[in-house]
Amino acid sequence: MSEPDYYEVLQVHPKASPLIIKKAYRTLLLAGSHPDQGGNSEQTQLLTEAYRVLSDPGLRDAYDRQRNPSATTGPTLIVAICSQCGTYNRVRSETGLLVARCGRCKKPIGKPKLPGKSRKPLPPKAIALVLLATMLLAGGGFAYWLWQSTRDPLQRAMHLEDRGDMPAAIAVLESLKTPAALSRLGRLYEDSGRLAEAQATYEALLAKEPSPQAYLLLGGLQLKRENLSAAERNLKEATRLDPANPTALTLLADAYVKDEQYDEAIAYYRRAMPLDPANAELPYRLGMLHQIRRDPDQALAAYRKALGLNPRHRAALIQLGTLLGERGDHTEALTQFERAAVLGYEDADLHFRIAALYQRLGATSDAIREFDLAYRQAERDPLLRERISKALSALGARPPQD
C-alpha cells in the first residue's frame, strides 16, 4: 500500500502556509476526526502525524523532497543571444546578464541603458486607466471597511481567527458577552496557553448558561490543570445533563484514572463505549485499568476488542503481547510484538523483548538479529545496552560496532 499524501490528509495545497496547515488540522479534528468526537482513532493518528511533519520546517522540507524528487534541481540558466555575432551564451542569473560578455566575440551581452535617453511618457489613455483602477481600489477598500463595520461581531472574530490574527479575534470576543462568544473566547485562551483566563471565561459562561457544554468545557480544562476534584464535579454534572455524550463520559473516566479511582473509571469507560463504538481507544484504556487491577482475562478481552476496531493500535499490540508472554504463550506474544514493530517506530525495548522471545523459542540467529537491532536503537540508553551485551554474550555473540 502506498504511503498517504500528508497534504491530501490535511486537505491543503502543497504550498500552503504553516497557518493554513494548522487551521486545517484543527478544523478536521473539530469536524469529527478526533476519537472523542466520534472519529476514527487511526485517522486521528494519521492527521496528527501529517501535522507533525508539515508543521516542522525541516521535516516538511525533507518530506517535500521525498514526495517530489524532481523539485530539487540545479540552478536555472538563462540563454542569451549575442547581438553582435549571434552566439548563444548561458548566464546563471538576470543580474549576471547585465555584466556578462559573449564567449566568442567578448562583446557585452546585456543591453546597457544609453546615457541621456529618457523614458517615453505614458499616453493619456494609460493615465486614465491608472486613475480608474486607483478609484476602483479605493472604492473597494471603503466597501470592505463598511462591510466589516456592519457585520456580526462574532463572525468578524471568526474571520480574524481564520486569518491567524488571534490577538484581534480575542479583542473582539472580549467585548461580547454571549454564550457563543464566551465559549469561543475560552477555547482561544486555552489554545494560547492562557489557562487561568480560559477558566475564568468558562466560569462566566457557566454562570450565564449552565448547559452540558459549559460544564464539559470547564471540567475538561480543570482536568488539564490537574484540579481533579473540581473536574470530576463538573464533568459528572455534564454527564447528568447529557448522559449520551461520550466525550463527557470519557473525560470523567480519565479524571477518575488520574485520581486512582479505578472502579469509577471502568464504569464510565463502559458507559462511553456503546455511544462511541468505533473508538478503539476506549477498550484500550479499559484494558489498561483491568491490567492495573490484575485481571488479565478482562484485560486480554479489552485489548482484543481494541485491535478488532483498529488493528494498527500499537500500544494495544504491545500490551496484549506482554500479557500473553506472562501467561507463557510465547509464540502468540511474539506475533503481537512483531505486528507492533512493523508500524515504523524505533523502539529498542520492543526489539529487546522480541529477541528474548526468540531466545526462549530456540531461534538463536533471529534472537541475535533482534538484539543487534535493539542495541543500535538504544544509543541513549546505556542500561539497556548493558543488558543486551550480556544477552549477546550468553549467545556467543558480540554487540555491533557503532
Image (tube, helix red, strand yellow):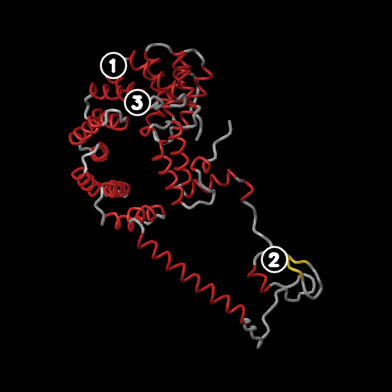
Q: Earlier in the sequence, mark 1 or mark 2?
A: 2
Q: Report crowding for label 2: few under 14, some 14 to 19, many 20 or more residues within 10 A (C-alpha).
A: some
Asked if disc 1 and disc 2 are in contact, CB closer than 8 Å, the reply is: no
Residue 54's place in the image compared with 362, above or below, is below
Res. 272 image quadrant? top left
Tell me the quarter of the image containing the N terminus.
top right
Label 3, label 1: how many angstroms apart (C-alpha)?
27 Å
Rendered location of residue 325, percent (x, y): 40, 15
294 with respect to 51 (left or right): left
Q: Which residue is mark 1?
A: 294
Between marks 1 and 2, how big is the CA–CA gap?
75 Å
Residue 90: name its quadrant.
bottom right
Note whether residue 221 is visible: no
Q: Nearer the viewer, residue 301 or 399?
A: 301
- The residue positioned farthest toward the top in the image shown: 328
**Type of the residue with mark 2:** Val
Count neighbours of disc 3 (C-alpha within 10 A) and say few if under 14, some if 14 to 19, many if 20 or more: some
